Image (tube, rainbow, N blue to C red):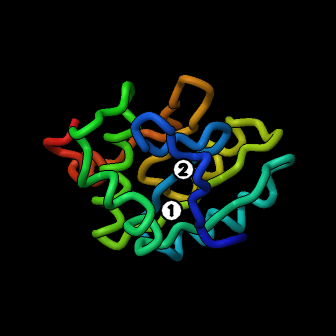
């Protein structure tokens, strides 16, 4: 498992929104839960790399764009998702960035659900799938932003 380092190619060139196609970004109650899920993720056949996104790394990657939301809005909901990531990180939540590689999305989803992910988004070409039912706390973090 590596530490989260957002790649420039994961940000759209037009608006700067985060859109890591072929990846899942998930958030957990704390870093220990994220680390445990990352360990279990290694058992999923054909999964690509897994990066631990500690709260400070999430804020560093997304806070400026989240503060600028509205200046150049994204076409979809990716800005709203970044706002969620930042608000949860400010509450000490940590995340994982999972490169799906050739893995089955359902197998990845099962690991995330078992690990207690509070939210998880699969970024596909032009579609973002919500993989777990967000907890009330995750929805509360986004209150007034959706």
Can you identify the residue that label 1 sits on? 95
Describe residue 117's horizontal placement relative to residue 91 as left or right: right
| Residue at position x 39%, y 27% in the image | 76
Say whether marks 2 and 1 touch (CB < 8 Å): yes
Q: Nearer the viewer, residue 108 or 67?
A: 67
Quadrant into which the C terminus falls: top left
Estimate the spatial distance between the alpha carbons at disc 2 and disc 1, rounded to whole Å.
7 Å
Point out residue 63 in the picture as x, y percentages from the top left corner: 33, 61
| Residue at position x 36%, y 32% in the image | 74
Q: Nearer the viewer, residue 138 or 126?
A: 126
Residue 17 figure quarter: top left
Point out residue 144 in the picture as x, y percentages from the top left corner: 13, 42
Is the residue 59 above or below the residue 122 in the image? Answer: below
| Residue at position x 58%, y 53% in the image | 8
Can you identify the residue that label 2 sits on? 25
Describe residue 118's horizontal placement relative to residue 19 as left or right: left
Quadrant into which the N terminus falls: bottom right
């Amino acid at each position: 498992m590596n530490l989260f380092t957002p790649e420039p190619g994961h940000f759209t060139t037009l608006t700067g929104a985060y859109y890591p196609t072929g990846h899942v970004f998930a958030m957990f109650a704390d870093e220990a839960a994220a680390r445990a899920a990352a360990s279990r993720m290694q058992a999923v056949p054909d999964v690509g790399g897994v990066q631990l996104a500690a709260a400070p790394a999430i804020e560093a990657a997304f806070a400026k764009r989240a503060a600028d939301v509205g200046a150049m809005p994204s076409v979809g909901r990716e800005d709203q998702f970044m706002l969620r990531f930042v608000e949860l990180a400010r509450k000490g939540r940590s995340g994982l960035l999972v490169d799906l590689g050739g893995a089955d999305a359902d197998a990845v989803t099962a690991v995330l659900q078992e690990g207690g992910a509070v939210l998880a988004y699969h970024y596909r070409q032009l579609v973002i799938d919500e993989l777990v039912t967000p907890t009330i706390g995750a929805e509360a973090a986004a209150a007034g932003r959706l």
